[in-house]
């Protein structure tokens, strides 16, 4: 086989093995299903009153913003070999703090900034508590964050006296409902924050150290890595990003629902991370993959509503899509597919074994 063909085959194999590719393909397929039902589904128009973009795609990226935030934080935690089940509850706490403060405030920009600082400070503290329980106390991440998931809702109820709380503040609402250069501010903020996190973990040794403790905790300790500090950093970052997601979710309606805000979004975050190719066993992680997973989850949610799937059938519908996608990402399924359809893409070792 010619060297050029070998290079082409190698690139094709790498591409087929990329979880990000399958996430993008699944998103495109979902959009195609919607277009089949309504050919104008992907149409984007400009609101003549304010010049903002309007359309289903705009709604999808707006809804993807909070999922993206908790997925990025979850990605860092899972890379350490842990899990964070408390992100949905921390979202609720952040919303409760901000709404409770703004309820009695005067509605100025300064009040909005104070509400944001209070929400993020408490979210960071709750994430740090998770990190302390895992890194210092030595509890299993599943148990530690499960406790925080239950306690977080209780904290939100204490803050709001058990009532759903609403407030009015144009500056705070602009975070989720405003537009900049025609695009939703909430999506632009999510992208900027994701890029910043990616820059920090990939342009420094932090990302490699997080992956190291996830791959082999004992070897990383012998290499001199401070596992406790890294775990505390990962869980604190997850809590902080969950707080940002809580602000996004609350600002969109200027109301915190202590029972529904952030409810089960930890599952969406885990799905987004897994779809993006990060293993639940820890180690290598991909923030880009988590972003693709967040967009896929948002598109899937929008598709379920658009197709009129009943609320009782929605979990089953989502489960089928996720199972199919995970099968496509399976190494065994991909090898079988290549053996049947594209034998030229097999490596010599794979061809002999088949």
Image (tube, rainbow, N blue to C red):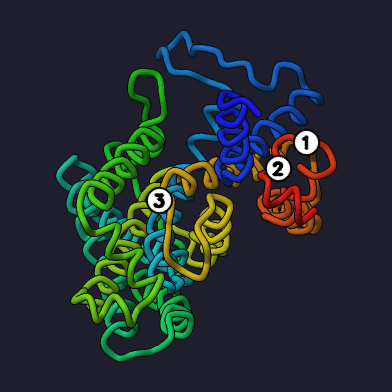
Apparent side of residue 171 relative to residue 188 in the rendered image (left or right)? left
Q: Quadrant of the N terminus?
A: top right
What residue is at 63 percent from the left and 40 percent from the top?
16
Q: Could you tell me which secondary element the residue under label 1 belongs to?
A: loop
Apparent side of residue 268 relative to residue 228 in the rendered image (left or right)? right
Q: Which residue is mark 2?
A: 346
Q: Residues within 10 Å of mark 2 (few under 14, many from 20)?
A: some
User: Quick one: 281 or 95, which is closer to the camera?
Assistant: 281
Q: Is residue 123 visible?
A: no
Instruction: Indicate the quadrant where residue 308 lies.
Output: top right
Q: Nearer the viewer, mark 3 or mark 2?
A: 2
Q: Which residue is mark 3?
A: 69
User: Quick one: 348 or 126, which is closer to the camera?
Assistant: 348
Q: Which residue is mark 1?
A: 342
Q: CA distance from mark 1 to mark 3?
A: 38 Å
Apparent side of residue 145 relative to residue 112 in the rendered image (left or right)? right
Spot occupied by residue 199 in the image (x, y as percentages of width and height): 25, 44
Q: Nearer the viewer, mark 2 or mark 1?
A: 2
Q: Residues within 10 Å of mark 3 (few under 14, many from 20)?
A: many
């Amino acid at each position: 086989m010619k060297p050029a063909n070998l290079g082409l085959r190698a690139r094709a194999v790498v591409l087929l093995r990329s979880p990000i590719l399958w996430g993008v393909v699944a998103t495109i397929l979902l959009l195609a299903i919607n277009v089949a039902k309504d050919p104008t589904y992907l149409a984007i128009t400009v609101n003549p009153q304010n010049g903002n973009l309007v359309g289903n795609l705009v709604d999808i990226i707006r809804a993807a913003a909070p999922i993206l935030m908790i997925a990025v934080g979850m990605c860092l935690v899972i890379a350490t070999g842990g899990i964070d089940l408390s992100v949905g509850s921390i979202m609720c706490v952040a919303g409760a703090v901000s709404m409770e403060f703004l309820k009695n405030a005067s509605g100025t920009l300064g009040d909005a900034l104070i509400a944001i600082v209070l929400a993020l400070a408490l979210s960071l503290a709750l994430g740090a508590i998770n990190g302390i329980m895992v890194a210092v106390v030595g509890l299993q991440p599943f148990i530690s964050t499960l406790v925080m998931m239950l306690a977080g809702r209780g904290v939100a109820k204490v803050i709001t006296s058990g009532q759903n709380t609403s407030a009015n503040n144009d500056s705070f609402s602009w975070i989720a409902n405003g537009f900049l250069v025609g695009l939703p501010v909430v999506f632009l903020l999510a992208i900027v924050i994701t890029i910043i996190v990616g820059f920090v973990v990939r342009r420094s040794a932090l990302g490699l150290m997080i992956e190291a403790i996830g791959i082999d905790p004992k070897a990383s300790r012998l290499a001199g890595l401070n596992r406790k500090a890294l775990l505390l950093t990962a869980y604190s970052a997850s809590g902080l990003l969950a707080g940002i997601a809580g602000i996004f979710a609350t600002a969109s309606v200027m109301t915190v629902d202590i029972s529904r805000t952030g409810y089960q979004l930890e599952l969406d975050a885990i799905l987004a991370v897994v779809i993006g190719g990060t293993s639940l066993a820890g180690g290598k992680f991909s923030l880009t993959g988590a972003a693709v997973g967040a967009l896929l989850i948002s598109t899937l949610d929008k598709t379920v509503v658009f197709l009129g799937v009943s609320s009782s059938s929605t979990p089953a519908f989502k489960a089928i899509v996720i199972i199919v996608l995970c099968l496509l990402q399976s190494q065994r399924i991909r090898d079988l597919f290549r053996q049947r359809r594209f034998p030229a893409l097999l490596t010599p070792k794979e061809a002999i074994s088949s």
